[in-house]
Image (spheres, rainbow, N blue to C red):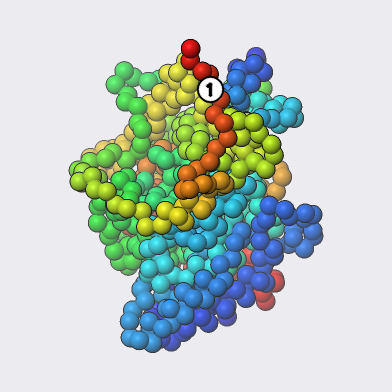
Amino acid sequence: MSLMDKTARNVAEKVRRGELSAVTVLEDAFERISAVDGRPGALDYGEISDEDKSKVHAFITLTKDRAYQQAQDVDRSVSEGEDPGPLAGVPITVKDIFCIKGTPSTAASRILANFVAPYTATPVERLEAAGAITLGKVNLDEFTYGSSSESSAFQPATRNPWHTDYVPGGSSGGSAAAVAAGEGLLSIGTDTGGSIRQPAAFCGVVGLKPTYGRVSRYGLIAFGSSLDCPGPVARNVGDAALMLSVMAGEDRRDSTAATLPVPDYLSSLDKDVRGLRIGISPDYMRIPYPDLQTGEVVVADLPKEIRDAILNAAQALADQGAEIVENVPMPNMSYGIPTYFVISRVEAASNLHRFDGVKYGYRTQSEFSDLREMYRKTRAEGFGLQPKLRILMGMYVSAAQYSEQYYQRALKVRSKIRSDFEAAFDPQGAYRLDALLTPTTPTTAFKLGDVYGDTVLMQYADQLTVPANHAGIPAISIPGGISSEGLPIGIQFQAPDYREDTLFQVGNAFEQATDDADWRKIKPQVMKFVE
Amino acid sequence: MTDEITPELFEHLVDLAAFAFDPKEAKYLRRELNNQLKAIHQLAAVPLEEDVPPASHGVPYTDQNSPSLREDLWVPCDNPDEILAQAPQVEDRYFIVPDIPHTELE
C-alpha cells in the first residue's frame, strides 16, 4: 500500500516517531504524481491528446527541489530529537492563489504567469512550520472565477480523478483532484461561494469552509474580500481537523482574522452525536433556477440519488442518537446566487484593478503610445474572459446610478440570508440546531465543456454552498455516496459561527457509521494507473 | 425582453475598465452580462423591511473576535529590491510608465 493511501495523521505520527522518513513519504508522493497527473498546466499547451484526457493535471508548478529540502529538514530534526510538528512529513499541495516566497504564484492567469511571490501566505507558512511538505501549486479557475476549473489560462485543465471526462469542480479543482488521486494527502484551497466544498463533493473528498476570519487571508490573491475563506481539503474529516488546527488563528497581518482562541479540533473527533440537533430544510431539497427566456424562477427537484444521500445520512446520525429536526425554513437561501452575482463582482472588480502592468505581472509586448493604451492592451491580453466579465459586472452594479438598485439591495438581502441561519441556530429559538444537513451540490460532476461558457448555469452550481459564504458561517462537505454513474455525491453540514468543532464531530460520526458501506470501496478511475 | 446592457452602455463600461474586445468577445460578454442581470433581478422581489441593515460581511466584528487597535508602527520591508524586481520596467528604483495622457492648463 502506498503511503499516499494512508491518512495524514498516520503518516505524521510515524514521521514524528522516527518510524518513517519524510523523504520516503515524498518519494511515494512523486511516484503517484508521475503515475496519474500527466503534464502540468501551461500557457502554451498545444493539442490536448488522448493521453492528456486520461490524466488528472492537478499541477501548475511542481516545487520538487524545495520539497526535498523541506523533507530532509524534517528528517534531520527528528534525528536530532526535535519535534518537527503535527504535520511532520505530510505532503500537501497549495492552490495557486496563495503566495509562497520564491515560487511562481499565478492565480491561473496569464497576467500573473511570471509573478514570483516575495512573501508567503500565513496559512501556508503555518502548515510548513508544522512540518508539512509542499509538493507544488495546483490549478484552479482563473483568479478562482468558476466552478469547474476549466477557465484556467494553464491547460490542460484539471480533470476529475473519478472519471476524467468530467470536471473536478472549482475553483479549487486542482486541490480536490490532487487529494482524491492521492497526489498529496492534504491541500489548501479557498472558498468564496463554494470553491472548496463544491470540488470536494465532485471529487469525493472532504472540504471545509471555515468561519470567515477563522483563517488569515494574508498572502491570498483576493477575489471577494468579504467572502474569501482559506480552508482544508482532505480525504477524511480527522485530517481536515488536524489541518485546520494548524492553519487557524489570529494574524497581525490580517485585521479580519478572528482573535478567538483555536479549539482542539482533534478532541471533537472523540465525541459522539447523542443529543445533537441536526436540521433538514426543504428549501435545500429543491433547485430554483431563472428561466433566461422569461425571467421567471423555475423550481426543479433535487436528483433522487442526492436526495437519498441526505436522507441516508440523517438516518445514520439518528441511529447514533442525534435528533433530526425536519422542515427548518431557510426562505432566503434561493437569493444566494443573485446576491452573490452582485457582491462578489463588486469586490472582484475592486481587487482586479491593481493588475495594470506597472508594479508586477504581465505588461503588453505590443506598441503603446501612452499609459492608458498600455493599461488597455495589458489587461486585454493578460486577463481571460471570466475576470473581464466580473470586472464589467462589478463596475456596472456598483455605479452611482445603479448602486441603490443592485449593490445596496444585495447587501441587505445578505442580512436576510444570515438571519435564516441565526433563526435556525438560535439556542432559544424554535429549531435550536447544532448543524444543518444539506446537499453540497445540485448535481454530481458534469462533463468538461457541458456548462463552461454559460456563466449563469455555472454560477448556479454553487447555489447550495453560497449562503454560508454570505452568512460567514462554517460549512463542510464530506463524501456521502457514489451515483449510479460512478461519481461522488457530497453532503454538507453547516454550523454556527466558529463551530467547526461541531462539523468535525458530526462529519466524523457519519464517516464511522458508513465505514463499511459498499460505496466507500469504489476507487477513482485514475487509480488504474497505480494498481 | 430588451437588453439592459445595450451596445452603447457596454462600450462605456469597456472604456471605463480599460479593456479592448474583438466583436466576438464583445457579443459573448454582453450576452452573459444581460443573462446574469436576469438572475440578479430576482432581488427586486425580496421584501426588505425598513430595519434590514446592509451587511458588508456575515460574521459580526466584536471586541471578542477582533484585534484591538495597535500603535501605528513603521516596519521596514526587508526585501524591497526583490519586490521592485517584479516590475516590468524599473529605473533607479522607480517604476517606469509611458506618458500619462494629460491636458496642459492655460
Residue tagged 1 = B102
Q: Secondary structure at mark 1?
A: loop
Pinpoint residue A340: horizontal percent, then vertical percent: 48, 34
Tell me if B43 is positioned left or right of B10 in this view.
left
Q: Is residue A361 above or below residue A24?
A: above
| Residue drawn at x 23%, y 44% as measured from the top left | B72
Subunit that carries the residue with mark 1: B
| Residue drawn at x 44%, y 25% as measured from the top left | A407
Q: Amino acid at mark 1?
A: His
Q: Quadrant of the C terminus of chain A?
A: bottom right
Pinpoint residue A417: horizontal percent, then vertical percent: 39, 33
Front-lying residue, A356 or A34: A356
Pinpoint residue A225: horizontal percent, then vertical percent: 42, 40
Q: Quadrant of the N terminus of chain A?
A: bottom right
In this orientation, does residue A252 appear?
yes
Tell me if A414 is positioned left or right of A93 in this view.
left
| Residue drawn at x 55%, y 64% as measured from the top left | A136
Front-lying residue, A407 or A317: A407
